[in-house]
Structure formats: C-alpha cells, structure tokens
Image: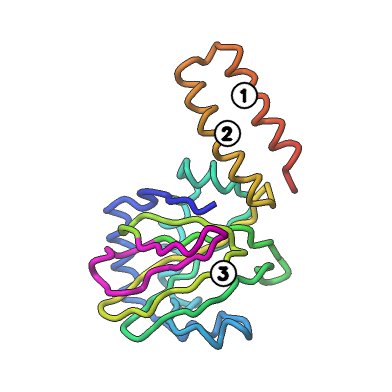
Amino acid sequence: MLLHIPSVLAPGPLDTVRKLLASASFVDGKLSAGAAAQRVKHNQELDKRAQQMDMLNNIVMSSLVQHAVYRSGALPLHVAAPYYARYTPGMSYGDHLDDPMMGADGVLYRSDIAITIFLNEPENYGGGELTIRTAFGSNEVKLPAGDAVMYPASSLHHVNEVTRGERLVAVTWVQSLVRDPARRELLYELNQAREKMLQTSPDAEETAKVNTAYMNLIRMWGDI
C-alpha cells in the first residue's frame, strides 16, 4: 500500500526543522548504506553526532506518531529515529531495497514500512522524485512540504537526480504489528469504514460487527 500522509508537520514546526538543518553538519550518505546501496547512493545525511539531532527528532517524530493516518496505516510496533537527507544538483539514489533488518547496539527491528517526509516545497527543486515500483507500475512521488508517503520497504525504489535547488527529506522505517502488507491494506480500508460507522451510526448492530471483526483480525494477524 502506497499511502499519502498529509500535514505531518505544520508550518511552524516545519520552519524550525529547516532552520535547524540549515545550521547542521552533513556527511556522505554512503556512510549509512550497505554494500549494495553504496554503489547507487549519492546524497548527504545529517551527521549522527550533530547537536541538532535530538531537537529534530522530537519535532518530527512526535508529529508523525500522533498522526491518525500513520497510526491506522502502519499499525506500528517499532519506529526508528529518522535519517535527514539532503540532495543538491547532480545527486540521486539509484534503484535499491531497504535493509530487511535495521537497528544498532543489539536492538534490531524488521523494516516493514518506509516513510519519507518531505521538508521543502516541490517547486524549490527540480527532479528528486521518489519513484516506487509496484505490481501496477512505477509511482513518482513529490509531495508538498510537511507531507509524507508510506510504502512497503520491500518495494524497489529510487530517487531521481536533482537538477536544481535542494531536496530535503526525513526518512524512517517501521516494524508493523502486521507483517504482511496485503493484510495491512485490508485492515486500513476496514478501519476507514469502521471509523465512519462509529461516527454516523455508533449504536447500529452492523457497526458493532465491523468493530469486532477489525479488532479480532488485528488479534489474529498481530505479530509481536
């Protein structure tokens, strides 16, 4: 499921994030890549030792984890601290798959879902589309600042070369309660119907049945 998450960051926090990144130190993105990805990764990432990191993570992640679309679509069990990536003219990230297992210091998690949060406006840079391959073809994604896209981390994807300006994004990964992406998509769609029914006809017998089915499917498919 490729899911657009609107307005993860409001204008105020988004402006703060951009100011923090403007004063921060970036390093070669290849330093965080595996052997295969190093061959095609041409970007910069915020230095993990940067003093701005904790403040950035507090702003970005507190907004993301409270977002209703994220919570319903991801059914998160574990979410990683994000990387902050910068692309300037000539930079790109070729076709790659994200590592299936991530983490550090003995704490590992499975990367079921990838999330890219766009930090500057699409008209501020040329190119830089996130292109995600699916069974139904390729999808090019270039969203307004503050919006995010969520997609299965098992999808082959790339970032087109930036031709002008600067592309800024935050990227993170989620281990979901529900490992299978097709089941997550069914649960997301069922929950949309369930929430509408709870608002419009909370006392109806059909609403209770849909609510019970949703809860028990999570219990049946949950992986913890």
Give the labeled residue for mark 2.
190
Residue lying furthest front in this view? 136
The residues bearing labels 2 and 3 have C-alpha atoms spaced at a distance of: 27 Å
The residues bearing labels 3 and 1 have C-alpha atoms spaced at a distance of: 34 Å
What span is colored magenta in the figure? 118-142
Neighbours of disc 1 within 10 Å: few (<14), some (14-19), many (20+): some
Closer to the N terminus: mark 2 or mark 3? Answer: 3
- 3 or 1: mark nearer the eye: 3
- Label 1–label 2 contact, CB within 8 A: yes
Give above or below for 143 relative to 211.
below
Q: Which amino acid type is shown beneath numbered disc 1? A: Val
- Label 3–label 1 contact, CB within 8 A: no
**Per the image, is 134 magenta?**
yes
Q: Which residue is drawn at 47% across and 43% down?
A: 69
Q: Where is residue 171 in the image (x, y as percent from the top left)?
A: 48, 65
Q: Residue at x 29, y 81 (%)?
A: 163
Q: Which amino acid type is shown beneath numbered disc 3? A: Leu
Give the labeled residue for mark 3.
156
Element on which disc 2 rests? helix
Neighbours of disc 3 within 10 Å: few (<14), some (14-19), many (20+): some
Q: Residue at x 59, y 45 (%)?
A: 185
The residues bearing labels 1 and 2 have C-alpha atoms spaced at a distance of: 8 Å
Q: Residue 210's mark?
A: 1
